[in-house]
Image: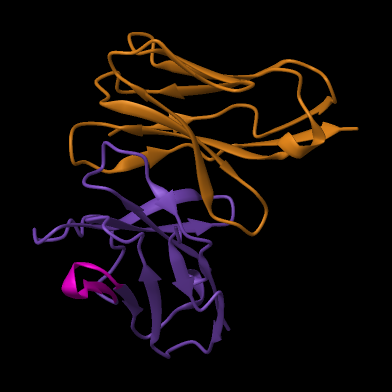
Chain colours: A orange, B purple
Amino acid sequence: KQEVTQIPAALSVPEGENLVLNCSFTDSAIYNLQWFRQDPGKGLTSLLLIQSSQREQTSGRLNASLDKSSGRSTLYIAASQPGDSATYLCAVLTGANSKLTFGKGITLSVRP
Amino acid sequence: GAGVSQSPSNKVTEKGKDVELRCDPISGHTALYWYRQSLGQGLEFLIYFQGNSAPDKSGLPSDRFSAERTGGSVSTLTIQRTQQEDSAVYLCASSRTWTGETQYFGPGTRLLVL
């Protein structure tokens, strides 16, 4: 059974810092991995999707990497801003047409 | 274009009552998903519809939970004889064709069972 872990559960940083959010998964035979953002009281917004054959994806100040063999992914946020404050969740898809398995998320607070 | 919409946004009900939650996916998306998000539990998959195929119900926690998708578009999640442990945020998502694509989430329905 696939398990996804995100540690720590919460993180507080000053504005302007570059930061890394970690995600690990137990079954390396994944199809893809996705990072989502969730603002309080809202649904999830997809940030980046990395296929199993890819090593990384970039969107603006965000860069997600994937090391399938070690069961790890990182989300790098450059020059963090208070608007980046949210909960970040990673999710893995194990097999085509299977379901996403989510981590519990990391709640990020960026202090002005 | 419009995103995924859900209604109601909030629902308070008494234990033992039935509730219906509605999801309107993005137009043209054939794959639709229901998830449950409980405090401290993370996102839990409930059910997945893809086109006209039989739905994947493997995540439904009990036979009190059921879901329909009529005409390949709107979906309704029904919880019968609600229990306090059913209190959670119920999220719906859709993707263009299948689970390997980006899923777009609705804002959720916050259910409170008293």
Task: Specify whether B107 is left or right of A27.
Answer: right
Between residue A6 and residue B2, name the one nearer to us: B2
Residue B11 percent location from the top left of the image: 55, 81
Between residue B81 and residue B50, name the one nearer to us: B50
Residue A25 covered by magenta stretch: no
Residue A74 percent location from the top left of the image: 53, 18
Residue B72 covered by magenta stretch: yes
Give the residue displayed 33% in from the left and 8% down from the top. A69
Give the residue displayed 18% in from the left and 34% down from the top. A96
Magenta span of residues: B65-74
Q: Is residue A69 above or below residue A79?
A: above
Give the residue displayed 36% in from the left and 40% down from the top. B102
Q: Residue furthest right?
A: A112
Residue A15 percent location from the top left of the image: 85, 25
Q: Quadrant of the N terminus of chain A?
A: top left
Q: Quadrant of residue B52?
A: bottom left
Q: Is residue A67 above or below residue B58?
A: above
Q: How many marks?
A: 0
Residue A64 percent location from the top left of the image: 51, 19
Q: Quadrant of the C terminus of chain A?
A: top right
Task: Specify whether A53 is left or right of A103.
Answer: left
Between residue B95 and residue A35, name the one nearer to us: B95
Give the residue displayed 38% in from the left and 32% down from the top. A3
Task: Specify whether A19 is left or right of A55.
Answer: right
Q: Is residue B99 above or below residue B1?
A: above
Q: Residue furthest left?
A: B53
